[in-house]
Amino acid sequence: MYSTTVRTDFVAQHYLTVPEPGPEGDPHSHHFEIELTFRGPELNEYQYLVDIDDANAALSTLADRYRDQLLNELAEFADTNPSVERFARVIFDRVTSIVTDETVTELAVRVWEDSQAAATYDAPI
């Protein structure tokens, strides 16, 4: 199985909405780092799994969408707790609609909210 990983980072804000969230219930910032790992068993005719330029363009689009935003106010987080786990799934859904290389069969999205905490969502595509 081949894999290719790209990443970016940006600052965004959120607050948790679960019952009694403590200080995490107040708006606060994170320096998020997003890692996309594309996987597949075959390379394409150019001998790569995914076009890294396309993957980086998708990341740039995502970073532009979320940079300096309060996640709670965005439609994709309406009526949900904007946890780092939920953020990973939201990014997964957006990336799979942008990057459509036929050689990619799986995608893992890892979202770091600081240097010690991350969540990953991965699935076949």
Image (cartoon, rainbow, N blue to C red):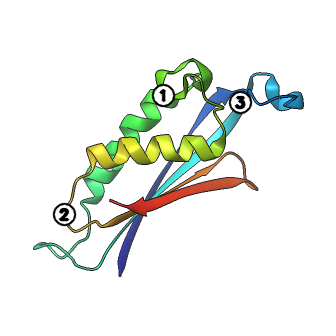
In the image, residue 106 above or below residue 25: below
Quarter of the rendering containing residue 24: top right
In-image side of 41 versus 67 (left or right): left
Residue 1 horizontal/vertical position (percent):
35, 82
User: Which residue position is annotated with label 1?
Assistant: 76
Residue at the location (43% across, 61% down)?
Answer: 123
Quarter of the rendering containing residue 13: top right
Residue at the location (57% across, 57% down)?
Answer: 120
Residue 77 horizontal/vertical position (percent):
55, 27
Q: CA distance from mark 1 to mark 3?
A: 18 Å
User: Number of numbered discs present?
Assistant: 3
User: Which residue position is annotated with label 2?
Assistant: 102
Q: Which mark is residue 37?
A: none
Of mark 1 and mark 3, the one earlier in the sequence is 3
Q: CA distance from mark 2 to mark 3?
A: 36 Å
Q: Which quarter shows the C terminus? A: bottom left
In-image side of 80 versus 35 (left or right): right
In-image side of 69 versus 94 (left or right): right
Residue 67 horizontal/vertical position (percent):
53, 29
Q: How many residues crowd mark 2 within 10 Å: few (<14), some (14–19), many (20+)?
A: few
Residue at the location (15% across, 72% down)?
Answer: 44
Of mark 1 and mark 2, the one earlier in the sequence is 1
Amino acid beneath label 3: Ser
Amino acid beneath label 2: Glu
In the image, residue 5 above or below residue 77: below
Residue at the location (74% across, 26% down)?
Answer: 17
Q: How many residues crowd mark 1 within 10 Å: few (<14), some (14–19), many (20+)?
A: some
Task: Assess whether mark 2 and mark 1 are in contact (beta carbons under 8 angstroms).
Answer: no
Q: Which mark is residue 29?
A: 3
Secondary structure beneath label 2: loop
